[in-house]
Amino acid sequence: MTPVRLTVLLTGCGTVALAATAASAAAQESTEVAVAASAAVQDLSDFSIEELAQINVQSATKQDQPLSSAATALYVITGEEIAASAALSIPEALRLAPNLQVQQVDARQYAITARGFNSVETSNKLLVLIDGRTVYSPLASTVFWELHNRPIEDIAQIEVISGPGGTLYGPNAVNGVVSINSRTAHDTIGGMVRAAAGENEQSAVARFGTPVGPDGAIRVYGTWFHRDGLPRGVGPEANDRFEGVQGGFRADFAGESDHVTVQGDVFETDTGGVRGDGDRGHNLLGRWSHDFSRTSSLRVQGYYDYFRRDFLLAHDSLQTFDLEAQYNGRAGAHDLVAGAGIRTTRDEFINNLNAFQLVPASRRLWVFNAFVQDRIALSPELAIIIGLKAEQSSFSGLELLPNVRLAWQPNPHTLFWGAVSRAVRTPSRIDRQLQAPPLFIAASDFETEKLIAFEAGYRGQPTDRTSLSVSVFFNRYDDIRSTEGTNPAIFPIRLGNGWRGHSYGVEAWSSLQVADWWRLTLGLATLWKDFELKPGHLDLASGDSLGHDPEYQLLGRSQMTLAPGLTLNAGLRWVGDLESRSGPGIGDYVEADARLGYRLDEQVELFIAGRNLLRRRHAESDDTDRAQLAHRSVIAGTRVVF
């Protein structure tokens, strides 16, 4: 990324900030509010266990409800937790969720999943949304995390569901849903600058927000980052250096019954390797919501998204238009949410590195969907939740995704729940249309991968100072991808649906308020898998499509306010052996991160943060094509609000 582009982006944001400051006398009062709020970000004692249990979430039912009544395995990462942690990127922030498994593959790429199937190519069963915008790619049903570099300071909270969410979110919400929600423009009035630097990583962020009229607000931001390449791992030596810029805006206008949001981003990155390699893209989203009454509302959202990736003589681009409407209403014992949507995408994939091609290289796809879910109160304590989503795709046909949940809440601090759900991963373009004749042929009959999930859980507050969530699951999978020969010969090779089996496990997390200034959090996720090839099938890839997953992951975190303005946030993670049927595998490892922050006053904070502190370098991924070694990283920085 050229210094000129960086200078233009950050200077432009600074110019807007100065102009807005001079133009609005009202901004001073709002800035004081923003300074106080930003200072509170670093003091986690401001949030009691009770307040965290009652925090509003939307991802479980697509409408506001307290976390304590969400009948699903849901973990919330608050913006305050992110700001007080060592994370400076979205993938690193997701390490705070005990129900996610995060692997750093190289300086750019991460593989992130819930409940298994993790690797760069098989982490295709997790649906990710940023402010309601779906960010997975239909090329391979995966998420390219390197395309999303928003400032972490703008994140309000991240809601992580482990388990299927197909009824509300459609295909690809198989093993989990991650919903990343940014702060409204009203919450970011004033200015903020953050700069951080270490031996291998540097970044800078500038943001300014100002009121617009009596009921509106707008913010603009610009960010720059640079990361050195990682040491060589099981993959070949790679120049995975990564740097880029991103800018954007968000505007919110709130009336008595209406709320309008318009936001957008533009980004460009530069990567090591072939000259010109990198990513670029932009998006624009608009959302209008109207409250008919206290129990009835309508929301309409549309967005346009475009990205282009150039890497190793290959080109991949995707253009998306999406429009959806959702109605929420309550009548008697029924709490209803219903909606419909239409999406069209046009992709292009051109590979000049080897013989593998998509045929056709570019294609437009259409997806139509409708869903309805009803929460029926059988009694004040007992409710049943029944839902169904129907989705029709021009590529994969019709899918029906039902869901039944039972929730029993005998008191405000205790919830027991159970669920049975169907979810699917629809075929990607690679699944059906990748070919390299005569050795590899397209599998036009590749079927949908299917899941029937059984879940049960408890969420509650055993004492005033503790919270606890425990869930168990049993997942039955069928038609999972295999790489097969063409009977009776090995060649040509094609993709098939040869695997079936099940997985099961336990997920649990708990918070303990040891003292007013000290909070401890523990999290555990276990996973056991048992898969077999169906009769008449073989897999030349030795089960790589099943992912490479540890049987357990244990997380611990300590959050302390040591003195007025002085905070210490430290985390420890213990990850089990990485299961691999074909690769070298990775032994279990223990790693730590920490952040020490000190507020000089209400506007200026200094901090030092470290990741992977226990080892100079270690492996998290055993991908023999890409994996490099994660290494120790220590950075120092400052955050200034005004």
Image: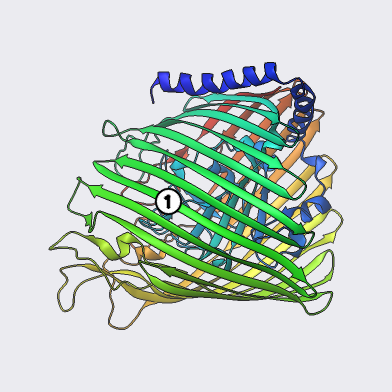
Residue 124: percent from left, percent from top: 43, 59
Three-letter code for the amino acid on which mark 1 is drawn: Thr
Image location of residue 323, percent across then percent down: 51, 56
Q: Nearer the viewer, residue 277 or 248?
A: 248
Q: Residue at x 41, y 76 (%)?
A: 500
Q: Mark 1 = which residue? A: 320
At mark 1, the secondary structure is strand
The residue sitting at 70% across, 36% down in the picture is 216
> How many labels were placed on the picture?
1
Quadrant showing the C terminus? top right
- Residue name at image x 29 percent, y 34 percent: 273
Residue 611 in which image quadrant: top right
Q: Is residue 61 visible?
A: no
Quadrant of the image for the N terminus?
top left
**261, above or below 292, in the image:** above
* 560 lies left or right of 337: right
The residue closer to the viewer here, 324 or 360, is 324
Near mark 1 (Cα within 10 A), the count class, few <14, some 14-19 or many ≥20, is many
Whether 593 is drawn above or below 526: the answer is above
Image-based side of 622 in relation to 313, left or right: right
Do we see residue 53 in this rendering?
yes
Please, is residue 153 above or below residue 428 in the view? above
Q: Give the image location of residue 413, x and y in percent.
A: 83, 63
Q: Residue at the far bottom: name it.
A: 535
**Type of colouring:** rainbow
Q: Kindly indicate the quadrant of the structure image that contains residue 386.
A: bottom right
